[in-house]
Image (cartoon, helix red, strand yellow):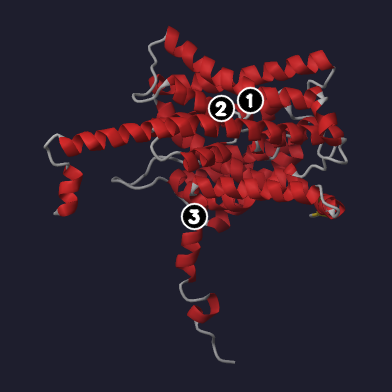
Amino acid sequence: MNAVPRARLFGRGSWPEVRRIGDVLRTETTGGLLLVAAAAFALVWANSPWRGAYFDLSALTVGPAAVHLDLPLATWAADGLLAIFFFVAGLELKREFVAGDLRDPRRAALPVAAAVAGMALPALIYVAFAVAGGGSLSGWAIPTATDIAFALAVLAVISTHLPAALRVFLLTLAVVDDLLAIAVIALFYTDRLNWVPLLASVIPLVLFALLVQRRVRSWWLLLPLALATWVLMHESGVHATVAGVLLGFTVPVARRAEGPGPGLAEHFEHRFRPISAGIAVPIFAFFAAGVSIVDSGGIGAALADPITLGIVFGLVAGKTVGVLGGTWLVQRFTHAQLAEGLSWWDVLGLSLLGGIGFTVSLLIGELAFGAGSAADDHVKIGVLGGSLVAALLATVVLRIRNAHYRRLCDEEERDDDHDGIPDVYERDARE
């Protein structure tokens, strides 16, 4: 048998194509659209005459039973694939604390305060609805999380003239929000704790840390250690996604060699973000967002449940007032100031974007009430409904602001054209 040329076997230009696909998946708009598409497909299927096949697929058990990893596909998506998302989040958090905006307390004060207040007030609103309506308090943390992929995707679609400082503020807020959400999952949603595998998970975690500190990138060394850390963390009772965050925290940010270029954390983030945005998060959304509205009693029954109402009002009103109010209070009583060029109308639009709670909110809902329960169905309706309302309101406000900044830009260009001084950019273009 003649050898097949490598170009024919893999397809000529296959690696450039793979790189192009990876670049597309790294964009915030693409990640957000895939997330929405997967959730919408799940909702349609779960409410179709063939919804039984969807729930059978979610409940299909795969994996080795000998190590207690015979899990339903929905659990694999929430515990396994989502660990990749949290690994990327851990890399981003580490990079922000070491070399980003969170390194400078003065620059970080406003978004950090906005994130804290934006988590506290939604939780209080949920508790108020639960107490008044006799609902369960277990889901208090559901409306506290912001879905960074979804929120940045909305901002990327809208923003053509919005200040760059608005995106920086949202990104910093979301990074702190992710950190607090991870802490909430680890501290409040761990039902049992098995100390033996928990302590054993430190061994592969430390070995992984030693290798990456020496700038080792070999996947055949790092991947088995990461998997061992995940398996032992899963066995300990701590939610396995925490393993992804801890692994991300071990990766060094600074370059060992002198000169410009990405550090190892940025390198890993560049490699794993397409997997997270293009595979892990959409698959999780597909399994997590599928709720049969008919089987759960309909929209009326969901809206009569204090769980649903607490989530919707927590995401829409709680996040908006919390983020906006927390920002105003810190600026009012400290020396921290909004970035130059930002107005309070911009912060209002950003605060509404913070009410888009999706990935982590759905995960906390499953941890609080159990996947497939009646309460979990109402959680999904509340998260999807609240996120949709928040996204629509944010779109209205930010489109108005975008039009305002576009008019300002057009006026500046007209002034440059009529002041008798050639515009430097036009001059360069002509030359």
* Residue position for label 3: 24
Q: Amino acid at mark 3?
A: Val
Q: Residues within 10 Å of mark 2 (few under 14, many from 20)?
A: many
What residue does disc 2 label? 352
Do callouts 2 and 1 mark residues in contact (Cβ within 8 Å)? yes
Distance CA(mark 2)–CA(mark 1):
7 Å
Mark toward the start of the polypeptide (1 vs 3): 3
- Of marks 3 and 2, which one's residue comes earlier in the chain? 3
Is label 1 in a helix, a strand or a loop?
helix
Alpha carbon separation for disc pair 3 and 2: 27 Å
Q: Earlier in the sequence, mark 2 or mark 1?
A: 1
Q: Amino acid at mark 1?
A: Val
**Along the line of sight, the residue nearer the viewer: 197 or 268:** 268
Residue in the picture at 51% in, 45% down: 28
Report which quarter residue 148 is drawn in: top right
Query: Which numbered tag is attached to residue 316?
Result: 1
Which residue: 81% across, 52% down?
54
Image location (x, y in percent) of residue 78? 71, 43
